[in-house]
Image (cartoon, rainbow, N blue to C red):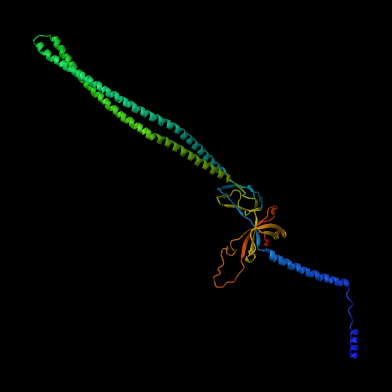
Amino acid sequence: MAVAEADQKTQNADVPQAPPEAPEKAARRKFIIGGVVLLLILIGVFFYWRSTFTEDTDDAQVDGDLYQVSARVSGQVTKVYVTDNSEVKAGQLIAEIDPRDYQVALEQAEAQLANAKASYQQATSNVPITSVEVRTQTATTGSDVTGAEAAAAAAAKNVAAAEARVAQQQANATKAKLDVERYTPLVQRDVISKQQYDQAVAASAGANAALVEAQQTVIAQREQVRQAQQRIAQARAQAAQARQNGPQQVAVQKAKAEAANAEIQQAQARVDQAKLNLSYTKIVAPVGGIVNKKNVSEGQNVGPGQNLLTIVPLDNLWITANFKETQLQHMHPGQKVEIKVDALGGRKYEGTVRQIGGATGSRLSLFPPENATGNYVKVVQRIPVRIELDPHQNDDHRLRPGFSVTPEVAIK
């Protein structure tokens, strides 16, 4: 045993021993190890925080409405004031169409409007005139009825007087006839003179003539009564017609005035349309932005609806982010978003989730997938999410539609 221990000591003495480690090196090693461990812990916490409190995607881009500027009237382009990729402001003049035809149309419409106003003035003036005429005619026909009735009454009295004269003349004729009959035997016996007899005969003839005249007067007076009665009937008919047609005549004149007023409105509408068409000869930018796809030049004939250029807006932009359906469990409108833009060196913008799409992108595609074919492979779908930029985030107008971005939504 002692010999073995001696051999062991001899072997240990032959092996070279490592020098003892310096305290500073040991402390540095511990610091490095601790730093690595701390870094791994921070990385783990970071990825845990990102997976728990945020959702992000690189399938996102800047979106905006592209405005197709088109002509609203036909004509020849006389001026073009923009070029491709030039910046325009809202209301800025882009191009002009020859306005002469539309200026002539406006003048013609204004002349028609003036004519319609004159017609309306005449029609409205005729309304009170017609009203006065109707009242006058009604009063006149009433007076005619009264006059005809008075004339008929006078004619009836004349008939009575004529009949009385007939009776008187009848009596005179009878007396004269009796005198002749009495004088005839007396003159034959020369009791009376021939002259007296001739006077009696003449008086009888005169009485008979007066009787005939009185009878004819009665006939004439009766005819006047008949005519007066006819005039009464005619006057009454005219009075009734005036009372019935008078309001209708006034209504007709009022209707003409209303029709003339309607014509004024139509003429005014034509004037307004002519003014609009004239204003459409000046084509202005509906929004501010960048001009693209310009396909109009001076001297070109254009028609209504023909696209002239496209304006890409610099304001009112938003982000369309296509998140996986597995990322939407805790996502809802109103959540804050941090947006990193690749084209601007990773510049970050602030935004807010505004809407979550109503269907997946594949369902909204031109040819939606048909999964009822027997061979089905589940694919995680993506839902478009609209993210609005916060106010004043794009005041420098650096963003452009189509830029790729990476949004990060704070879901908790």
Number of numbered discs overlaid on the protein picture = 0
User: Where the N terminus falls, by quadrant?
Assistant: bottom right
Question: Where does the C terminus fall, quadrant-wise?
Answer: bottom right
For the point 17% across and 14% down, which residue is it? Answer: 203
> Where is 262 relative to 405, above or below?
above
Residue 83 appears in the picture as rendered? no
Observer-nearest of 276 and 144? 144
In the rendered image, residue 222, in percent from the top left (x then y), is placed at: 25, 25
Splitting the image into 4 quarters, where does residue 220 fall? top left
> Is residue 72 shown above or below 319?
above
Seen at 65% across and 60% down, the residue is: 61
Q: Is residue 65 left or right of residue 137?
A: right
Across and down, in percent, residue 185 comes to 9, 13
Placement of 14 over or under 210, stated as above or below = below
Please identify the residue farthest to the left as the structure is shown: 189
Tell me: 123 left or right of 3: left
Q: Position of residue 227 (x, y in %)?
A: 28, 27
Please state the horizontal and vertical placement of residue 68, each as a whole percent of the image: 60, 53
Q: Residue 190 lies in what quarter of the image?
A: top left
Question: Which quadrant holds residue 344?
Answer: bottom right
Residue at the farthest front position: 1
Q: Is residue 321 left or right of residue 13?
A: left
Above or below for 149 versus 97: above
The answer to whether any part of residue 272 appears in the image is yes
**Residue under the image location 91 percent in, 90 percent down:** 2
